Image (tube, grey):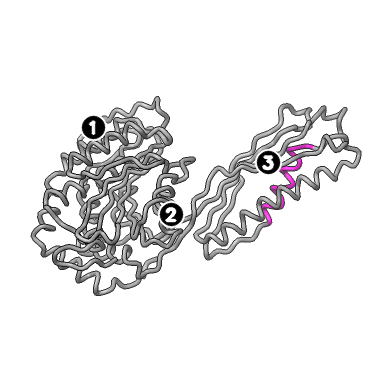
Amino acid sequence: MTNHPPILEQYTNTIAALLKNNQVEKALGCIQDQTELAMQEQVDLCEISAPTFQEEKRADELVKRMKQYGLTDVCKDGIGNVLGRRKGKTGAKTIAIGAHMDSVFPAETDVKVRREGNVYWAPGIGDNCSGLRALLQVLRALNEANIETDEDILFVGTVGEEGNGDIRGSKFLCANTKLDAFIAVDSTDVGRVLRGAVGSHRWRIAVDGPGGHSFAEFGKTPSAIHAVCRAGAEIAKIEVPEDPKTTFTIGTIKGGTTVNTIAAHCEVDVDIRSTDNTELKKVEDAVLAAFEKAVKEENARWPNALPETHLKVTTTQIGNRPAGLRPHDCPVLQSARAAQKALGIELTNYGLSSTDANAAMSLNIPSTCLCSGGKGIGAHTLKEHFVFEKTELGPKLILLTSLALAGTSDTKPLL
C-alpha cells in the first residue's frame, strides 16, 4: 500500500500529550543515552545458544534481567515463555510486548560475537536478540522514569517462533493468558507496522506399500512414487484467489531406492499459505483430498494386485500458523502509526508477514509486529550481522505505542 489510511486524531493527540509528559521525556532520554548498554545486552544474549526447543539458558538470563530492572512478578509459563508483569493502577486490561528467544541455528553453532566498528557479526545477533534488547530497553526506561500506567504491561520472551517451533510460545500465551493487546517485536526495520498475519499450514504426506522389482512385480504392486505424481498433478490444478492472497507448493519430495524398483515409500512436504483462514482451509482440504484420490487411482490401476499390496496414505501436520487481518482503525495499529509519525519515522511497510503476532491476530486481539531498530542483515545465515545505528528508534516506538494503549497520568488508555 502506498496511500495509507489516515491516522485518527485521538491517537495523534495522545502521542503529542505523551511527548509533553516529563516522565515520558525522561524515559525516551534513558533509551537514547543507554544505547551502548543495550547493545552490550544484545551481544550477551546472543552468546547464549538458544535453538528452537532449547531456549532454557537464554530464558533464565531473561528472567534474571527482568528482575534486575524492577519486575517482581516474573515467571516461566507451562511451555517455557518468560513472563514479567508490570502492574498498572487499575490492571483492568493487559498489553503484552513479546520478543521471541529462539534462533534457527543448532546448539553447536559458534555464536561468539565479533565486532568490526559499528557492525556486530554472529548468527542470531539480529534475529531476534535485537528484539530482546528492545524489550528490555522499554522495561528499563519505564522503571527509571518511574512511569505508572493505568493498565498492566506484560513483558514476554517467547519460545518456538522459528520454523518447526510453529509460534508455539505465542499460541500458548494467547490461549492461556487474558490479553487485550499484543505487540510482537521482531526484525529491525522501524518503518514496518504489520497489519496482517500470513497463515500457513504445513503437511508431511507419506504413501507406503510393499514395493517390488520393476520387472518381476510389474502389474502386481502399485508404486508409491506414481501415486504421489498423480497427487501432484491434481494439486497443480487447484485454483486460488489473488485476494486474499493464497498459495501452495510441494516443497520437498523423497522416495524410492533404486532405478529398477517399484517404490515402496514416497513422502512430500506441502506448504499452504493465506491471509484468510477460510481460504487456507479450502486449499488444505483440496490438497489432502488429492492424495486420497491419487492413492485410490494408483491402487485401481493394477487390477491384478492383491489387497495386501495396496498403498496407504499417512498425513502428519508439521506446521499450523493461523492467519489474521486487523482493521485500519485497530488501536494498536493507530497508536503505532501515530508514534511513528511523531518520531519522524516513515511508514514504508504496512503489510503482512508471519510472526508471533499471528496467534493474537487470528483471535481478533488488537495486535501488530514492530521492529527493534538498527539494521539486521543476513538473518538465518552464518554471515548474519547487525549494524549499530539508530537502535534507539525501535524501543522509543514501542514505548510510545504501549503507553498510548495503557494510559498514563496525563492520558487515557486508547485500548
Query: Which label belongs to residue 358?
Result: 2
Image quarter hosting the N terminus: bottom left
Instruction: Sort mark 2 into few (<14), some (14-19) or many (20+) by Cα contacts within 10 Å.
Output: many
Residue at the image position 68 percent from the left and 33 percent from the top? 255
Task: Check whether the beta carbons of the residues at disc 2 and disc 3 lie within 8 A of each other.
Answer: no
Query: Which label belongs to residue 314?
Result: 3
308 relative position to 248: left or right = right
Query: Is residue 145 or residue 263 the one in the foreground?
Result: 145
Residue at the image position 71 percent from the left and 27 percent from the top? 257
- Return the disc, 2 or 3, that comes first in the chain's sequence: 3
Residue 13 visible here? yes
Residue positioned most to the bottom:
9
Image: 373 above or below 329? above
Query: Is residue 212 or residue 81 the one in the foreground?
Result: 81
Q: Position of residue 6 (x, y in %)?
A: 31, 73
> Residue type at mark 1?
Arg
276 relative position to 189: left or right = right
Instruction: Sort mark 3 into few (<14), some (14-19) or many (20+) by Cα contacts within 10 Å.
Output: few
Image: 376 above or below 242? above
Task: Look at the image and give the residue range highlighted in magenta.
Answer: 223-237
Q: Which residue is mark 1?
A: 115
Q: Main secondary structure of the magenta part?
A: helix
Q: CA distance from mark 1 to mark 3?
A: 49 Å
Image quarter hosting the C terminus: bottom left
Task: Check whether the beta carbons of the residues at disc 1 and disc 3 lie within 8 A of each other.
Answer: no
Residue at the image position 43 percent from the left and 54 percent from the top? 358
Instruction: Sort mark 1 into few (<14), some (14-19) or many (20+) by Cα contacts within 10 Å.
Output: some
- Return the disc, 1 or 3, that comes first in the chain's sequence: 1
**Residue 83 occupies quadrant:** top left
